[in-house]
Image (cartoon, rainbow, N blue to C red):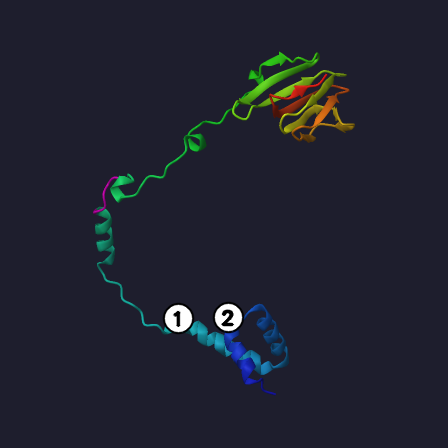
């Protein structure tokens, strides 16, 4: 039984790789049904593959390479933006030219905080945002007093334990407090924290 002309056309379109997904599915089913359709598909694919070899070759001028290198040699030797009438791309010094701030651990200057048993090592202060990034160390048994956050606060526990709102946080845990939130915290065995917080937080006790 010969396949319908419609499916022969599908075979040609399949060989050209122009069928959509649903059409390819229909064609695949017809391939199972008609062995002759496989022969039609193979003939179309062979014909398409031969098309590239039927175009006449275009001869390349024998002096093409020499003319190309001559044109390159005639180009301006400078590579500045002005020599090719291009405007230099403006770069922001803060994005590309300001070196990264690196604070070595042995250069951190620790100072006693206003809460007994707490010390702080400043890493960076953003005066515009009024934020401080710092290390904070709490001795065992210390309770940090009730305070209100003026902005978002982020705390990462580097060592030890920190109890916040009844939750015990350990090494690797992250705490984020929203602006206006109020809480106190404490540690049982002592802890070392990496903190980013507002310098306008308000101590309530």
Q: Which residues are magenta?
A: 74-78
The prevailing secondary structure element of the residues shown in magenta is loop
Vertical placement of residue 113 versus 100, above or below? above
Queried whether the magenta region covers residue 115, the answer comes back as no
Q: Is label 1 or label 2 in front?
A: 2
Q: Residue at x 52, y 80 (%)?
A: 9
Read off the residue under disc 2: 18
Distance between the Cα atoms at labels 1 and 2? 18 Å
Q: Residue at x 52, y 25 (%)?
A: 128
Q: What number is the disc on residue 151? A: none
User: Which of the 4 image quarters holds residue 78?
Assistant: top left
Read off the residue under disc 1: 52
Vertical placement of residue 87 versus 150, above or below? below
Vertical placement of residue 21 versus 5, above or below? above
Quadrant where the N terminus lies? bottom right
Q: Residues within 10 Å of mark 2 (few under 14, many from 20)?
A: few
Q: Residue at x 58, y 87 (%)?
A: 2
In the image, taking residue 99 as reference, residue 178 lies left or right, namely right
Label 2 sits on a secondary structure element that is loop
Count the marks: 2
Instruction: Answer with mark 1 or mark 2, whichever residue precedes in sequence.
Output: 2
Where residue 26 appears, x then y in whole percent?
A: 61, 75
Label 1 sits on a secondary structure element that is helix
Q: Residue at x 23, y 62 (%)?
A: 61
Where residue 188 appears, x then y in whole percent?
A: 77, 20
Where residue 158 appears, x then y in whole percent?
A: 67, 25
């Amino acid at each position: 039984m010969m396949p319908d002309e419609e499916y022969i056309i599908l075979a040609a379109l399949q060989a050209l790789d122009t069928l959509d997904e649903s059409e390819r599915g229909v064609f695949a089913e017809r391939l199972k049904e008609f062995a002759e359709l496989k022969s039609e598909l193979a003939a179309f694919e062979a014909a398409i593959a031969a098309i590239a070899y039927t175009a006449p070759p275009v001869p390349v001028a024998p002096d093409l390479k020499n003319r190309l290198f001559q044109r390159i040699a005639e180009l301006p030797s400078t590579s500045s933006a002005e020599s090719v009438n291009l405007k230099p791309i403006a770069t922001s010094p803060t994005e590309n030219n300001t070196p990264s701030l690196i604070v070595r651990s042995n250069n951190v200057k620790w100072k006693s905080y206003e809460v007994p048993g707490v010390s702080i090592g400043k890493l960076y202060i953003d005066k515009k945002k009024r934020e401080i990034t710092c290390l904070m160390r709490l001795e065992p048994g210390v309770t940090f007093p009730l305070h209100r956050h003026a902005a978002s606060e982020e705390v990462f526990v580097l060592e030890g334990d920190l109890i916040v709102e009844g939750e015990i946080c350990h090494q690797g845990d992250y705490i984020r407090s929203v602006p206006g939130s109020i809480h106190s915290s404490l540690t049982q065995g002592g802890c070392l924290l990496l903190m980013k917080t507002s310098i306008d937080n308000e101590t309530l006790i």
